[in-house]
Amino acid sequence: MDVLIDHEEMKLAQIQKIKLSVKDLKDKIASENKAIALLEASVTKVFTSLASGKITKEAFLHKKDIINDTVARKRSQIEKWNETLYMLMEGRSEVENAIADLRATQTLESLSRKVVDHFIDKILVHSESDIEIVWQGGFNVQQNVDENNLEN
């Protein structure tokens, strides 16, 4: 369980390192979306210049590539900001709740169905003496079981 708690505490530390507020992030996302709309509209203008003979096909393709690359970079940045926004808005409480749940279970001597459903994604039995527990969130613990230490 300590590994799971450490992982959740690392997530919480990442959230606490974020220097931007929710409002700042929303403003940045809105600004980038406006910039993308302007860039996409400029493709039409560049195409019109091509159609009217003001620019060559090569110049059109070059400008279009530049616009497409810029839009892709802006969308990538927006995606990162959305992830950060999610962490700020909902991630903190989810991580704090997960840490509280994990700490509450550190003293458990047996697993109830509720605990298993909450923390364990699946249990894989590779052989009679080799099991793997896949925890929620992707943590895996593989163990060779000594048959002499099993309680009946």
Image: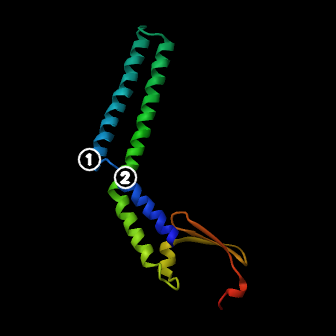
Q: What residue type is labelled 2?
A: Lys
**Which is nearer the N-term, disc 1 or disc 2?**
2
Residue picked out by circle 2 = 17
Question: Where is residue 42 drawn, in percent x and y?
Answer: 37, 22
Say left or right for 115 vs 15: right
Say which element carries label 1: helix
Q: What residue type is labelled 1?
A: Lys
x 56%, y 65%: residue: 139
x 41%, y 69%: residue: 99
* Residue situated furthest bottom in the rendering: 152
x 47%, y 82%: residue: 107
Indicate the quadrant containing the C terminus: top left, top right, bottom left or bottom right: bottom right
x 47%, y 73%: residue: 118
Residue picked out by circle 1 = 23
Which quarter of the figure has residue 52? top left
Q: Residue 151 carries which label?
A: none
Question: Where is residue 27 drawn, in percent x and y?
Answer: 28, 41
From this view, report whether residue 95 is shown above or below residue 50.
Answer: below
**Viewer-nearest residue: 2 or 136:** 2
Q: Distance between the residues labelled 1 and 2?
A: 16 Å
